[in-house]
Image: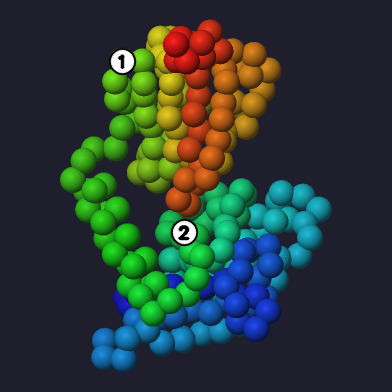
Amino acid sequence: MKNNIAILCGDKDTLCSLDEVQTITIWEQQTLSGWQKRKIFPFQIAPAASMEALRNQIRNLITMLDDCKIIAGLSITGLAYHVFDRMGFRIFEISALQEDTFDKILADIRQSDDISAAAPVPTAPVALSDGVYHLDLIQLQEHFPDISSKKALQSFLHDTPFIRLNLLCSHLPLWLKTPEYTKELSIRTKKYGNGIMATISKKTCIDIERN
């Protein structure tokens, strides 16, 4: 199967985020002529009354992408990111379309696959140094979809003495926003590649970290 990449386009074929998309362009890598447009079709995200309605719109889009499993745009976040991810898509946020953009995307995928093949995927937070842990929840759930975020984290959060947990995820698990956890944990998030990096500390450890 050839390499195909779907690009989100807005007005006048400009790169855009998913909520602004007007057309989808699928580019295909040809052996001799490089990257060529294989398919262009209109698509817009309609205001959704519910999360299920939005999920159905994304699923409908996926059926229109044929065998393409790579999608890129200015921004793909939230529920849409989660649906694409669960359907096996490689998701990229790019700031511009340049001559080498598609080749760089494929190189990133190959590098990521090489790293995944070379090392086992941790199913629980891994210690980086005293009290500091890391877990790539995106990679974990890609390899072990039956392991929920609760299964991967709850025992650690309740039973492990830690100062900081760096959690890479597509979105912050909703259960971490409940009072049971917000009263005990300080959580800061920032954009990190295609996902977010959540820095989680026990509130009693914040002062220890600062000293």
Q: Is residue 42 visible?
A: no
Which residue is pictured at 70% across the width and 56% down the height? Answer: 54
**Relative depth, front residue between 119 and 108:** 108
- Element marked by disc 2: strand
Position above or below: 102 against 35: above
**Relative depth, front residue between 126 and 55:** 126
The image's mark for residue 91 is 2
Q: Amino acid at mark 1?
A: Asp
Few, some or many residues within 10 Å of mark 1 (<14, 14–19, 20+) = few
Few, some or many residues within 10 Å of mark 2 (<14, 14–19, 20+) = many
Which residue is pictured at 36% across the width and 21% down the height? Answer: 132
Q: Amino acid at mark 2?
A: Ile
Q: Position of residue 122 (x, y in %)?
A: 31, 32
Position above or below: 151 against 145: above
Q: Nearer the viewer, mark 2 or mark 1?
A: 1
- Element marked by disc 1: loop
Q: Position of residue 42 (x, y in %)?
A: 65, 80
Outermost residue to the right: 49
Which residue has dot 1 on it? Answer: 130
First in sequence: mark 2 or mark 1? 2
On screen, residue 187 versus residue 127, left or right, reads right
Q: Position of residue 76 (x, y in %)?
A: 57, 57
Which residue is pictured at 18% across the width and 45% down the height? Answer: 118
Q: Quadrant of the N terminus?
A: bottom left
**Relative depth, front residue between 93 and 135:** 93
Which residue is pictured at 56% across the width and 63% down the height? Answer: 74
Position above or below: 25 against 94: below
Q: Quadrant of the C terminus?
A: top left
Marks 2/1: CA–CA distance = 33 Å
